[in-house]
Image (cartoon, rainbow, N blue to C red):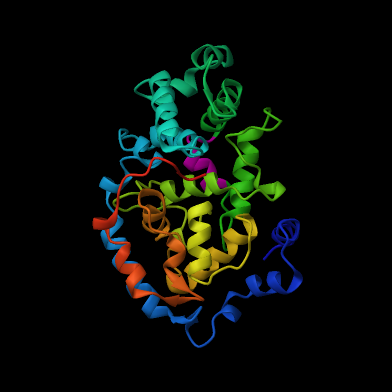
Amino acid sequence: MTGANEQNLLRQGFGGQEIAKLAKPEACVAKGRVGGAGVEEWRVALEGLYAAYSDRGFAARDPVSALYSYDRLEDREVVGLLAAGLAYGRVASILKSLEEVRARLGETPAHFVCDATNDTLRRTFRGFQHRWTRAEDVVSLLAGVREVSREWGSLGAAFGTVSGEEATVQEALARWVGLLRRGHAGRNSLLADPAAGSACKRLFLYLRWMVRMDAVDPGGWPHVSPARLIVPVDVHMHRVGQALGFTRRKQADLATALEITDGFRRIVPEDPVRFDFVLTRPGILSAIDVRSLGKNGKLDPEAMARMAPRHMRLDDSAAKE
């Protein structure tokens, strides 16, 4: 773990012993146990949920669905970054805003952004608003996307250039965001600042979409290993992490995200974000309290059974906040 990572963790409330523990993840594993359950026991149970929920049918009202209409990776990169940035608030509001943004971008978003002047972007998004995100946030972000795409060819190519060899994507993400922010200083509701210790849950969500490839996540960035991803922690995944015994922290911040990621890495080191989508489906789409999933890190078979799709109902009240 680098000094920059340690400083970010200190700002988020980690103590020295906790930081030392994260620096040596093998010290977190005692006799192959995760919480009170064995690693293999957890993996079998979670793979059962993955088989049940890893389906685009469950993503129809998830922001990732905005990417499915585009065959070109460059278009998915642009739309995905906006979709992740707007993924806060009620599902209906998110989907409505995404529909509006996509309509304004046209059929080939990457081409539109690369060819657009700042004045064109301002005219295109005049009057746009999603909760506290304003048109100027969209314009500033897309202007950064334009400059990065012109210099490196695509957002993915730029990320690959600054990726480095760190154990996680945290520092690479900070460098990549720095490229997007060049010449566009100031706070942007769509673009968190990893260098300032932000939890970056929406940017980690974006990386999940871009890096992983399965029935839900379209992928496209093979130069980034899924093993380096960090779990995007929202209120639902925070509850899951507490239920599984991965964290006792009260805030869904960067330190909590790293603890929860470390917990999943002990179960599936090659893809610690593998279960993010499937574990947050019941919390969003049904009345089941995911905190009943486990107690003190011990599996609750009855709670696991209640998370089966047949118990689900549509709940429009939450998303990746």
Residue 125 horizontal/vertical position (percent): 51, 17
Q: In this view, does 307 lie to the left or right of 134?
A: left
Residue at 39%, 36% in the rendered image: 76
Q: Can residue 157 be seen in this view?
A: yes
> Disc count in the image?
0
Question: Magenta stretch containing residue 159, yes or no?
Answer: yes
| Image quadrant occupied by the N terminus | bottom right
Residue 256 at x, y = what percent? 60, 61
Which residue sits furthest front?
A: 287
Residue sticking out furthest to the bottom: 31
Q: Which residue is drawn at 51% across and 60% down?
A: 239
Q: Is residue 239 above or below residue 302?
A: above
**Residue at 63% of width from left, 64% of height from top?**
249
Main SS of the magenta part reads helix
User: In the figure, 321 relative to 242: above or below?
Assistant: above
> Residue 112: x, y in percent?
44, 20
Question: Which range is magenta?
Answer: 152-161
Q: In this view, which residue lies farthest toward the left?
A: 310
